[in-house]
Image (cartoon, rainbow, N blue to C red):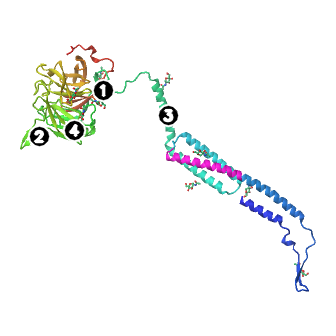
């Protein structure tokens, strides 16, 4: 623009000039009468070059018009340039946002950006051509377009791992999955609700899963193990293992493992010793346990106090031991389970709370089920069954139903008897349980994971309980008389 204006000014100056310097003729000077200096200029005898003047004026006029036209054109270019600069800064902002992850990096955004940049580029080239020459605004425009192009190319290079392609693939997979789900006509069973009894009772048991040998070794064949059986326990990961002394009677040591991994690796254990040194070599064993009927419930270990008719419970946090008589219960190996000694009292827990399984002289050795009140540590209610306690190898409770086992052979156990405290009905059933070793020392059901843990001659074994659908009761076909 400046160039053109300069030409214009020059042209106008030439157009208004009366004569060129070459038109001035020879000049001679002389001194007059009054002493003044006289000069005579002799002009050549040709007329004023009017034709040249006119032609100059015409040229000037034409030039003026053309410059005016150029100026209007430039002004219009400038306006459109301003609009495009604004769009460009908008574009830059969006690209930056995408780079920072503020905007979602979707395919649509990306393609749109590339399209707009292409449009801008071709427009800039057009502008430059029509302006024919350098211009600061167009140079800035070009730099910015180059910059934004670089940014978009970088964005494109981020997609080296085919993020967009993978995204498309996932979308299509998701759609197919949804179709598949829609097509599925067979209703799937509802998710398992741990800690509730919304099912049709025990119908099967999985194959055993051997966790490990107890930490004291192969000779420690007697004991129990598991997790806290309280439904709302605050220590869902804690494992306990109680291996009796080799006398098959006294529980003196209990080991706690903070997690399953720790249990498996014998790591980070806490050992609780239940005997107390009185003086010299004399120990107090009264807080020790007797038999393998112990259970951990709401952070307290419940067990038969050593050599006594009492129930003991030890708070694992405080180590405080409380005792309470279990009324009429026999003890000291009067009616234990088949093949195991001193398990006169067997504690159990389920969705409904805490239970004690034992016998009395009055029940003639048949199993008595007692519902314990945890806060008062007393018996709330009892049920007397028709099943002789030494006739079963072990027992556990699920949703208020007692299940008892007997051996089929050295490798197999059968859950053959049940007693429902909810209805007072008992019944027969047959669920096979494979076992690794011959003797079942302890069986516990845990409502928190529906697992049954077995202390199998020193080995820690688990099974998963399988429940039937919730409609109806397993006991409808029961033959046993109500108590
Ligand atoms: C000017 O005039 C003088 C005398 O008339 C002459 O000598 C001289 O050459 C002239 N000069 C020019 C440039 O014409
Ligand atoms: C720039 O972006 C703002 C908001 O993001 C919008 O309101 C405005 O119209 C845009 N300008 C142009 C020229 O696209
Ligand atoms: C642009 O300028 C160059 C010389 O600088 C000239 O050769 C060319 O014809 C011009 N083009 C237009 C469209 O004015
Ligand atoms: C272009 O990018 C460079 C650095 O990448 C920056 O220094 C420059 O200011 C940018 N120019 C414009 C016009 O945005
Ligand atoms: C779903 O069912 C329809 C017809 O019932 C069938 O055309 C379609 O292929 C099925 N889709 C899948 C994913 O099985
Ligand atoms: C019970 O579970 C065992 C072990 O998974 C399996 O072999 C058996 O077929 C199941 N029995 C029934 C009646 O479902
Ligand atoms: C466990 O907690 C839930 C809700 O906190 C409560 O409804 C339920 O009765 C509790 N169960 C036991 C056995 O305390
Ligand atoms: C479980 O134990 C905690 C603390 O020892 C106690 O506050 C809570 O009442 C117990 N829960 C039940 C249901 O007894
Ligand atoms: C359990 O014992 C506590 C305290 O003695 C008592 O308040 C509560 O009613 C008892 N629960 C039942 C179900 O008997």
Does the beta carbon at disc 1 come under 8 Å from ligand 7? no
Q: Given this view, does label 4 or label 3 mark the residue nearer the observer? A: 4
What residue is drawn where x is 10% and y is 26%?
A: 333
Q: CA distance from mark 4 to mark 1?
A: 27 Å
Q: Where does the magenta region start and end? A: 75-102
The residue closer to the viewer here, 275 or 394, is: 275
Residue depth check, mark 2 versus mark 3: number of the one nearer the observer: 2
Q: Residues within 10 Å of mark 2 (few under 14, many from 20)?
A: some
Mark 2 or mark 4: whose residue is earlier in sequence = 4
Relative side of 6 to 336, left or right? right
Q: Give residue 171's mark.
A: 3
Residue 38 picture location, percent across and down: 89, 82
Q: Earlier in the sequence, mark 3 or mark 1?
A: 3
* Residue at mark 4 to residue at mark 3: CA–CA distance: 48 Å
User: Residue 57, image x and y in percent?
Assistant: 84, 61
The numbered dot on residue 276 is 2
Residue tagged 4 = 256
> Mark 4 or 1 closer to N-term?
1
């Amino acid at each position: 623009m400046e160039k053109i204006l300069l030409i214009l000014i020059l042209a106008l100056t030439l157009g208004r000039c009366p004569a060129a310097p070459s038109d001035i003729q020879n000049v001679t000077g002389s001194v007059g009468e009054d002493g003044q200096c006289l000069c005579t200029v002799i002009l050549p005898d040709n007329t004023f070059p009017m034709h040249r003047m006119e032609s100059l004026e015409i040229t000037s006029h034409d030039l003026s018009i053309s410059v005016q036209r150029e100026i209007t054109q430039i002004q219009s270019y400038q306006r459109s340039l301003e609009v495009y600069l604004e769009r460009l800064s908008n574009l830059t902002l969006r690209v930056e946002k995408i780079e920072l992850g503020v905007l979602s990096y979707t395919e649509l955004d990306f393609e749109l950006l590339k399209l707009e940049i292409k449009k801008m580029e071709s427009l800039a080239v057009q502008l430059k051509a029509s302006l024919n020459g350098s211009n600061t605004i167009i140079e800035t425009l070009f730099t910015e377009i180059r910059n934004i192009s670089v940014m978009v190319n970088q964005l494109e290079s981020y997609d080296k791992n085919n993020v967009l392609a993978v995204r498309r693939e996932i979308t299509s997979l998701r759609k197919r999955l949804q179709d598949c789900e829609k097509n599925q006509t067979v209703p799937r069973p509802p998710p398992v609700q741990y800690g509730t009894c919304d099912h049709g009772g025990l119908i099967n048991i999985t194959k055993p899963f051997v966790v490990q040998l107890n930490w004291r070794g192969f000779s420690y064949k007697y004991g129990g193990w598991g997790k806290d059986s309280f439904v709302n326990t605050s220590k869902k990961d804690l494992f306990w293992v109680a291996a009796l002394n080799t006398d098959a009677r006294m529980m003196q040591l209990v080991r706690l493992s903070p997690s399953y991994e720790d249990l498996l690796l014998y790591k980070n254990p806490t050992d609780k010793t239940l005997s107390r040194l009185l003086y010299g070599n004399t120990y107090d064993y009264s807080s020790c346990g007797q038999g393998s009927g112990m259970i951990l419930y709401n952070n307290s270990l419940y067990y038969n106090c050593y050599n006594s008719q009492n129930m003991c419970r030890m708070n694992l946090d405080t180590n405080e031991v409380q005792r309470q008589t279990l009324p009429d219960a026999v003890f000291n190996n009067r009616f234990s389970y088949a093949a195991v000694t001193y398990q006169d009292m067997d504690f159990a827990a389920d969705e409904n709370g805490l239970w004690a399984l034992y016998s009395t002289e009055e029940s003639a050795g048949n199993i008595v089920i007692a519902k314990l009140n945890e806060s008062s540590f007393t018996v709330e209610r009892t049920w007397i069954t028709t099943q002789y306690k030494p006739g079963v190898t072990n027992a556990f409770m699920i949703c208020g139903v007692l299940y008892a086992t007997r051996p089929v052979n050295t490798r197999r156990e059968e859950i053959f008897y049940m007693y429902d405290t909810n209805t007072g009905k008992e019944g027969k059933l047959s669920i096979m349980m494979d076992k690794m070793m011959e003797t079942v020392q302890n069986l516990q059901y845990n409502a928190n994971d529906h697992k049954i843990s077995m202390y199998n001659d020193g080995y820690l074994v688990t099974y998963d309980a399988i429940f039937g659908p919730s409609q109806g009761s397993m006991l409808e076909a029961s033959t046993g008389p109500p108590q």
